[in-house]
Amino acid sequence: MEQLLSDYDIHLFHEGTLQNAQSVFGAHLIKEKQKITGTRFTVWAPHARSVSVVGDFNGWQPGNLKMERVNREGIWTAEVGDNLEGEIYKYAITTQSGDVLMKADPYAVYSELRPNTASIVYDLSGYKWGDQLYRQRIRRRRPIYERPLAIYELHLNSWKQKEDGSFYTYREYADELIPYVKERGFTHIELLPLTEHPLDASWGYQGTGYYSPTSRFGTPHDLMYFIDRCHQEDLGVLLDWVPGHFCKDSHGLYLFDGQPLYEYESFSDRENLEWGTANFNLAKGEVRSFLISNALYWMKTFRIDGLRVDAVANILHWANSEPLTSNPYAVEFLQELNKAVFQENPRFLMMAEDSTDWPNVTGPVHEGGLGFNYKWNMGWMNDVLDYMSYHPFERRHHHHKLTFSMVYAYSENYILPFSHDEVVHGKRSLLHKMPGEYWEKFAQWRLLLSFMMAHPGKKLLFMGSEFAQFDEWKYIQGLDWFLKEYESHRQADTFSKELMDFYLSHKALHEFDHDPQGFEWIDADNAEQSIYSFIRRGKRKSDTLIVVCNFTNVSYDAFQLGAPFSGKWEEVFSSDSKHVGGTDHLNTEAVETEEKPMHHRKQSLTMKVPPLGITIWKPAKK
């Protein structure tokens, strides 16, 4: 039989440095002179006594299409002289104990619709992309660190459903979702995992088919169409990705050939008891080749713009260790992963969801860092939401919760996340978390989102939060779109669009997100009034913004604070406008500084400050 892998490729695979493993493993149509002459299957199963391919085409009888063992390390391959495109199949693996396991293909690019679990022979080639202008623009733009980054995180299953409860297809989502997100000013969408998974309620985080886009919404070509359409509308696409642990369903990776293979061998390292999953064995070269190839596969085959790497804390530490003990294999894996990704595409986004204080997550690998370019700021999120849970007049006792983030704001490149995890499992929606009466809830919701936009760091908001959904996320049904029939939620939707437009159009809110010169406190110590004031700076002096946030429901008609330089200033944004549900406590005319020293500055401004609101000022145009 023709040698499928060169000796060098085999060496790289076992070493952990093969970066295109999906091009040789899995099911592939054999083409000669643009004609399909057969189908080849390749799988890694070193502990197997024998392996065969089974499907409708051979009556699902083990042994009818036997695979040949290529090497001692357990690569198996088989070839059939038929075009099996569209056929379903599995591997029948005979274990050392004589049991026969029916396993889906780890490298399958398409799978049956759940609850069925077979893999499908599918040809990924042939889609004609139309996003060339988008890709050219991305290469010409300044680095993302200096540009606005506003991510709309969503779960396709439950963003919107048809009247009968069925899902839209990838192609239908292109018509429904893209205009909606585009109208609201987001720069990127982030999709909860699309890797094939058996249980809807896992939200995709417990996967079985890492190379297989879930068939819930259509074919791989349908997903390409959706991403292509996003790009044509200048909308980046990010994907949640789970390289730490995987689903233990019997057809998947777990004990693939009857013994630990993709997972660690020892029970304590292997079993993720909290989630009921198994941890990937990141010490094993073949597993690293599988995962790093997978990241590059999503980048190159589906042209996604970035990966949000899930549960990095779980990856970095040995499971079930007490106290937590770092895993050196995981550190090496993450560094190799990020090096491979950025070597292929320096503009790609690699974002770590890490809830620990692990140092240098976004530091370059050559300086000992993990090599990500962004980290979710979980500390900021927890502190802010905890602060907001208190009654406004109790907040003076917790003033530090909103100032502490600036102590470490430049230790990493941060994304500020109000994600799906904060609005589910009894945690309530962002709006419902806010204390007080109904109008106070909406005022604080506007203040919360405004504070996020004004604070250094890129932005992420989970679906439904943009129109202040009252109920928490119900992942088995669509969002509560009927709320748009109520004025308060229509106003909330209008506000979020205006806030996003303000963020996108003011360079001081993103040019120096990761540079200390972009932020300066005016008054960080006004705990008694629970008012925070600070400066955001861009590269030009005229882009300077003064931000004042009032976290109590007391309004002020003559609030004085120090100004960074003299001249006229005008209010350019307020969360208290009447048309978005506020009290209209606005500054309608420009205000000139007075030569009255305050807050260690030679001049000061006197302004109105709204209740439970934010007011933002800019030097008035001459």
Image: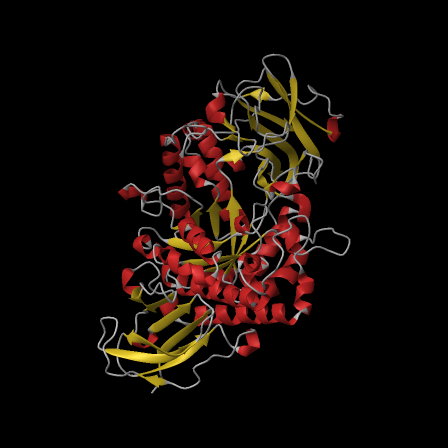
Question: Would residue 587 be seen by someone viewing this image from the given angle?
Answer: yes
356 shown above or below 522: above
Residue located at (48% from left, 63% from top): 449
Query: Count the marks: how many?
Result: 0
- Quadrant into which the N terminus falls: top right
Nearer-the-camera pick, 356 or 38: 356
Q: Is 490 on the left-hand or right-hand side of 262?
A: right
Nearer-the-camera pick, 569 or 601: 601
Task: State the scheme by which the image is colored.
Answer: secondary structure
Image location (x, y in percent) of residue 9? 45, 31
Q: Which quadrant of the figure has residue 141? A: bottom left
Q: Is 64 on the left-hand or right-hand side of 133?
A: right
309 shown above or below 454: above
Residue located at (59% from left, 35% from top): 208
125 shown above or below 450: above
Residue located at (23% from left, 83% from top): 595
Question: Would residue 81 be seen by someone viewing this image from the given angle?
Answer: no
| Residue that lies at the very extreme toward the right in this rendered image | 164
- Quadrant into which the C terminus falls: bottom left
| Residue that lies at the very extreme toward the top in this rendered image | 97
Nearer-the-camera pick, 371 or 536: 536
Image location (x, y in percent) of residue 146? 36, 62
Image location (x, y in percent) of residue 292? 45, 38
Nearer-the-camera pick, 396 or 34: 396
Q: Which quadrant of the figure has residue 59? A: top right
Image location (x, y in percent) of residue 619? 34, 80
